[in-house]
Amino acid sequence: MLPSGLRVLTEAIPSMRSVSVGVWVAIGSRDEAAELSGVSHFLEHLLFKGTEKRSALDISAQIEAVGGETNAFTTKEYTCYYARVLDEDLPLAIDVMCDVVANSVLDPADVETERGVILEEIAMHDDEPGDEVHDVFAEAIFGAHPLGRLISGTQATISPMTRDQIEGFYRSHYTAPSIVIAAAGNLDHDTVVELIAGSLGAGSATPAPLRPASVVPTRSPDTVVRDKDTEQAHVVLGCPGIDRPDERRFALGVLNNVLGGGMSSRLFQEIREKRGLAYSVYSYSTQYADTGLFAVYAGCAPGKVDEVLELTRAELAAVAAKGFTEAELARGKGMAKGSYVLGLEDTGSRMSRLAKGELLYGNLLTVDEMLARVDALTLDEVNTLAADLLTRPTSLAVIGPV
């Protein structure tokens, strides 16, 4: 940790000739006031529009001139700015990414340009019901709580948002103690620290902004149906899940794999393979700092929605009542272990693993430790979680001509 409170993590991988570096800020859409919904995502766009010493073209051209790539994304609990370059160009990547995050000028003209871009992005999202239905489901679960809002904000919040409001959010939230910089590839840790200290390490530590103490409400199950003229109906059925610190998250990963995590899963076999009722059907889980989601998605013909829901509910009830078999447990464990290891085949995923361990969990499990956690799971642990999770009251989101 630098004197400013900024944290730096690296993983040296001498066999690779590339390096990925990411600047991760512990601020996301759940940290926004209602009237500023979407400001984190708006800011993500604006930071690439120019700094005190680089124009928007300079930022992209300097990275692309060495064959590198750069991008960013916003989630409900953090924002990430990253670049991937050849190992010899790491000093350039660190200088550019630190400059982008720390020194954006937020030019008023750029604010108006990006406002138009974001409004088009929101409109595009509305034209993708297969994506939109997951946001509708989050709203059904969380209601007016920030976790129930769109990361992008809405036309009603983005249109009137001022440059001063965006800058105020930027200056008050993008402080060093809220930032983790992670890098992975052919690098030297001490050199990386020196480069970052020269670009972003100045100043003394100031208190990190605290996440709003907005308790996630306990809501009654809700059903939200949005009538749209689409070829398919898009359905999400689910319930509140477990939070990120919950040690049952490893059991949840196995449960999700067996229930709806692949072509051999129960839901895929029942709904698609045996009956041909849907092209896409899967389950998924999302964990936040203090809550979570567990849900099943299916895309099907509008006239088959009732049958798909009936089969889904029956499968959830059967797993809750009878659990899985030892063979299913073994398959679910194998899928979990394979996804952990195969997901770390490039420097970008290695860099993300470092940052998320520090930013979201406060500790970093080694790959061997994660695999050992999965291996240690018993059938009783997974089935006990299923009996708890899959009997919770469910909410439903549907988009389509239904």
Image (cartoon, rainbow, N blue to C red):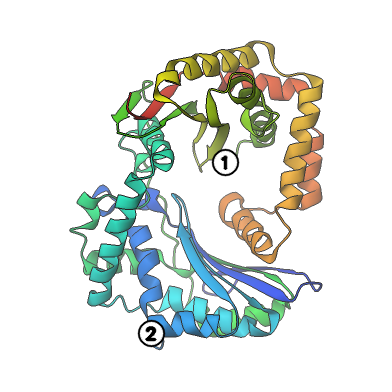
Circle 1: residue type? Arg
Give the quadrant of the N terminus. bottom right
Is the residue marked by circle 2 packed among few (<14), some (14-19), or many (20+) residues within 10 Å? some
Side of 91 relative to 55 (left or right): right
Q: Position of residue 284 (x, y in %)?
A: 56, 35
Q: Quadrant of residue 90?
A: bottom right
Q: Report whether residue 365 is seen.
A: no
Residue at 30 percent of width and 33 percent of height: 229
Q: Residues within 10 Å of mark 1 (few under 14, many from 20)?
A: some
Query: Of the residues shown, which amino acid type is indicated by label 2?
Result: Ser
Q: Upstream in the sequence, badge 1 or badge 2? A: 2
**Position of residue 270 measured from the top left corner of the image (x, y, whole percent):** 62, 19
C-alpha distance separating marks 1 and 2? 39 Å
Q: Position of residue 215 (x, y in %)?
A: 39, 37
User: Looking at the image, which is closer to me, 149 or 271?
Assistant: 271
Instruction: Name the residue beneath numbered marker 2.
Output: 55
| Residue 37 visible to the viewer | yes
Secondary structure of residue under mark 2:
loop
The residue beneath circle 1 is 244
Tell me if 93 is positioned left or right of 229 in this view: right
Residue drawn where x is 73% and y is 39% of the image: 336
The one of 338 and 166 positioned closer to us in this rendering: 338
Residue 316's mark? none
What x and y, as percent, mark residue 293?
A: 50, 33
- Residue at the bottom extreme, as displayed: 53
Quarter of the picture containing the C terminus is: top left
Please identify the quarter of the rendering in which residue 271 is found: top right
